[in-house]
Amino acid sequence: MRRIRLRPGGLRGRLLLAFVVVSLLSAATATALAYREARVSILERAQNSARDDFRTQVRLAAQEFDVPPNGSALTRLAGRISVGLNSAVVVARYRDLVASSDPGADQSRIGAALRATVRAENRLAFQRVEHAGRPWLVIGSPVTFDTSRQPSGLEVFAIFSLAPEERDTTELLTTVRDGAAAVVVLAAVLALLAAGTVLRPVRKLGQATRQLAAGHLDTRIKVTGGGELGDLARDFNDTADALQSSVTELRDQEALARRFVADVSHELRTPLAAMTMVSSVLDEDADQLPPDVAYAARTVSAETAKLARLVDDLIEISRFDAKAASLTRHELDVADTIHATLAARGWTGEVHTNLAPGVRAELDRRRLDVIVANLVGNALRHGAPPVTVTLFATADDLTVEVADHGPGLTKATARHVFDRFYKADNARTRSEGSGLGMAIAQENAHLHGGAITVADNPAGGAVFTLRLPLRTPARVSPDTPTRREENR
């Protein structure tokens, strides 16, 4: 059986809370209304019954009573009426004489306002009072002996206990309150069932969204029923269709663009090789040519060399984009490889090195050479001396730092320095580099399972840091994102 989990702030928890709160408010409101109506009904019934019985007993007792009475007659009158009222306390008053069916009863329950109403208005009146923590009903009436209903001076008061009625209303309130607990439990169960019907399609939508985000563009949701959830499922499927169509079109266009770049680059290689050979001959004989011709020959040679490097870089980039780049690993002495890279380009005298000896790793020599050459060449072209290359290793990684003491990089430049065709100074579109060197270096680092980062040099300038694993990773995904993709 699937466990129901309530997450703080989750839709299930909020639905459950809303249902419980509504049911509690409804139960409390219903209980209060029922208690009030029941209490009023019970008290009115008790009052009407007591008033009718009191009126009847007073009329019967008055038929055998003579005025003016003495104290004994007044006491007998009170006792007789009390017996007819199931032993309620009865107090009879005639001018200054007062008699009670229970001499020890507290007559303070008969309020002055009730006595004044009976005497002044010459009619039956009643009043509910609270005395000693218990409810009481006090009824008073004048006694008349003729049809003129002239006051005789005789007044009779009866005190009834409302404890049974209070007990009935309390039991009713307890019963209703106990029933409210069952209502709340039922509401919670209904809330969980309702939340399940709502959350089930929402959960499926969330799973489909995550699959879509993971690249499964054929993900769709089964549309069941109508209403808002059905419309939401249809909208998701329409969005997924549009996204799949757009992504497919973009992928096709990107594949065509990559194929075009690769084809053009390969087609340019043969004429460029011939042009490079001819330009190198012209460059060697430039001293024997007229000055204008010599300048033109050297310019053609330099531009041809740049074009050849650009074509090589484009071919290399196309291999990365096509996931065709691979590593030829050998166990290398990293310090010796870095020294060889600097020596091959004539940078030994321009670069200071601090290379830890004995650092060995399984790397592709050619790609490591490309990484170091791009980092050092970038520092020499755009930084300022001294340029320092530092090598050290930990238990798992090796680190190569290339630092310069130039103006450093702005935040915008550091954010895009590994982007393709990016140049810090956009006005210098005819700079020596193609704008692909740092992107190629980063791609080669990713291919090894490492990465290149850039930071400010505390002594001024910039520091590019290459980190590579000393051991071959168990699996290097060909889909490892490049820095260019991460910055998007």
Image (spheres, helix red, strand yellow):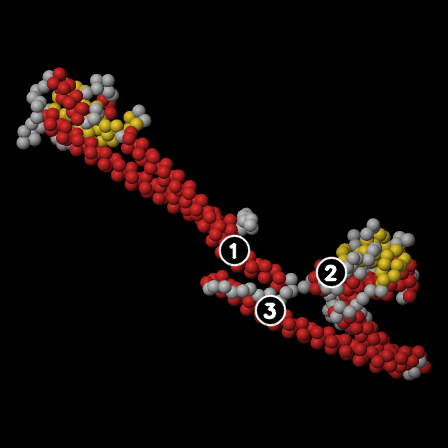
* Disc 1 residue type (three-letter): Leu
Is residue 462 visible to the viewer in this orientation of the structure? no
In the image, residue 281 lies at what x, y percent?
A: 92, 80
Nearer to the camera, 454 or 133: 133
> Does the residue at mark 2 contact the one at mark 3 (Cβ under 8 Å)?
no
Q: Mark 2 or mark 1: which is in front? A: 1
Q: Residues within 10 Å of mark 1 (few under 14, many from 20)?
A: some
Above or below, comparing residue 197 to residue 49 in the picture? below
* Disc 2 residue type (three-letter): Ala
Q: Residue at x 42, y 47 (%)?
A: 22
Residue for badge 2: 414
Q: Residues within 10 Å of mark 3 (few under 14, many from 20)?
A: some
In the image, residue 185 lies at what x, y percent?
A: 45, 44
Q: Which mark is residue 199?
A: 1
Nearer to the camera, 147 or 486: 147
Q: Which mark is residue 243?
A: 3
* Disc 3 residue type (three-letter): Leu
Above or below, comparing residue 48 to residue 85 in the picture? below
Image quadrant of residue 282? bottom right
Above or below, comparing residue 245 to residue 357 in the picture? below
First along the sequence among labels 2 and 3: 3
